Amino acid sequence: MIHFNHSTLSSSDTFLSFSLFPYPLLERNSPPSLPCKIQDLLWKISHFSLPVGPPVTSISPYSNFCPYCPLTSNSICHLFSLCSITSSLQTLTSNLLSQTSSSSSFLYLLSSRSISSNHKHIIRLIFSSFLWTIWTSYTSYTFGSSSPPSLPDIYISFYHNLLHNKSLFPSPSWPSTPKIKSIIYPAISSSLPPPPTILI
């Protein structure tokens, strides 16, 4: 199990709930392995070596703060577990996981002995899509010239990451593409801002 070093975390950090975010279960201990970029990301998360929070205060246009959560300091814990955008994407990921089995709990699915190793690999890839979507969204506004992506844009990015992983690792255990679309597209529509009111 990953333990967070108190000296590394700011006073506003909250420890991740491992029942919701079990990184150790994503390790490369079951073939076929996860994409290298995800393995690298997980290693850096577990060793607190990602450029998030104080290390990028002088670089990020938002200094040490999360652009989605006003007056909240950013950190690895916040970015991957506590941010409001992350919470919304977690809900969508859980809905997608529920299409692969009778449970939407990532920890339960990977711990279950009744689920095949191939099926668990697809579950890991779904969760990997979640992680990669968060990370690339963060880097786009921290190190690029982009504004923070909107929630609909993040959902669309998640959708494309899922389809990319599905094309790299085809398996009957994946939800069908129409099923994935039927879960994500309504979330995109419901998160769009209302149309402007036209006064006549």
Image: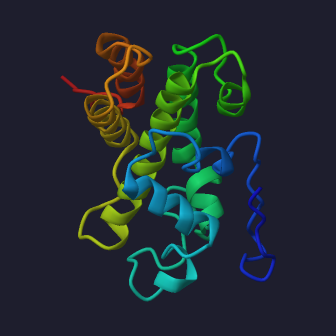
Could you tell me how many numbered marks the image carries?
0
Looking at the rendering, which quadrant does residue 37 occupy? bottom left
Residue ID at (38%, 49%): 35
Residue ID at (44%, 16%): 173
Please name whichever residue, 78 or 148, is drawn nearer the observer in this view of the structure.
78
Instruction: Point out the residue furthest to the bottom here.
Output: 58
Looking at the rendering, which quadrant does residue 154 occupy? top left
Q: How is the image coloured?
A: rainbow
Left or right of 71 on screen, residue 89: left
Decide: is 55 above or below 155: below
The image quadrant where one finds the N terminus is bottom right
Residue 31 position within the rendered picture, expressed as x and y whole percent measured from the top left: 49, 39
Decide: is 174 above or below 121: above
Decide: is 141 above or below 136: below
Left or right of 198 on screen, residue 113: right
Residue 109 position within the rendered picture, expressed as x and y whole percent measured from the top left: 66, 25
Residue 60 position within the rendered picture, expressed as x and y whole percent measured from the top left: 40, 78
Left or right of 125 on screen, residue 43: right
Please name whichever residue, 181 or 21, is drawn nearer the observer in this view of the structure.
21
The image quadrant where one finds the C terminus is top left
Decide: is 195 above or below 115: below
Please name whichever residue, 158 or 105, is drawn nearer the observer in this view of the structure.
105
Instruction: Point out the residue furthest to the front here.
Output: 31
Residue ID at (77%, 59%): 15
Residue ID at (75%, 47%): 18
